[in-house]
Image (cartoon, rainbow, N blue to C red):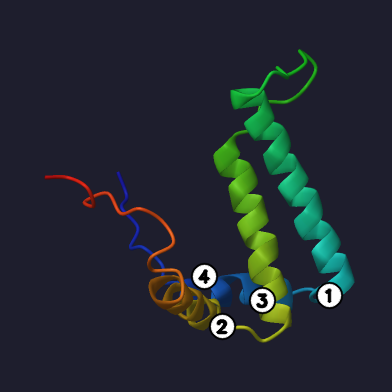
Amino acid sequence: MIVEERKTLEQIQQEVDNYISQFKEGYFSPLAMLARLTEELGELAREVNHYYGEKPKKNTETEKTIEEELGDLLFVLICFANSQGIDLQEAHDRVMHKFNTRDKDRWTKIDEGIE
């Protein structure tokens, strides 16, 4: 079994950019990218509904997984970030800082109330 080294977010963004850069069309426009994100989110919602909701798949529908749909959504999100020159690691760090400061007392921590 071949074990690949885990990629950093920077490497993943570069890998997507390398892929997109080989085509003349390049990245889609911001509005088209937003539409693609919405489409992929809808496909993820559909899969979650099939697995956990009251709407089973039809016999004619192809089998997809939540993992596959999350991967599609992640790819388009990375394309959007790349097209806007956004470093997703920096964006992640900023949002985690926000959650660890502004929102630090918003929810009950697991160890609170345990005696």
Label 2 SS: loop
Q: CA distance from mark 1 to mark 3?
A: 10 Å
Residue 65 x/y as whole percent: 60, 34
Q: Which residue is mark 1?
A: 30
Q: CA distance from mark 2 to mark 3?
A: 7 Å
Q: CA distance from mark 4 to mark 1?
A: 20 Å
Residue 40 x/y as whole percent: 74, 50
- Is 95 located above or below residue 5 in the figure? below
Amino acid of disc 2: Asp
Other-residue count near label 1 (Cα within 10 Å), few / some / many at <14 / 14–19 / ≥20: some
Q: CA distance from mark 1 to mark 2?
A: 16 Å
- Which one is in front in this view, the residue at disc 4 or the one at disc 2? 2
Q: Which residue is mark 3?
A: 81
Q: Which residue is mark 4?
A: 12
Q: Nearer the viewer, residue 114 or 61?
A: 114
Q: Earlier in the sequence, mark 4 or mark 2?
A: 4
In percent of the image, x 73 and y 25: which residue is there?
A: 62
Label 4 SS: helix
Q: How many numbered dots are placed on residues in this image?
A: 4
- Residue at the extreme bottom: 85
Q: CA distance from mark 4 to mark 2?
A: 11 Å
In percent of the image, x 73 and y 80: which residue is there?
A: 83
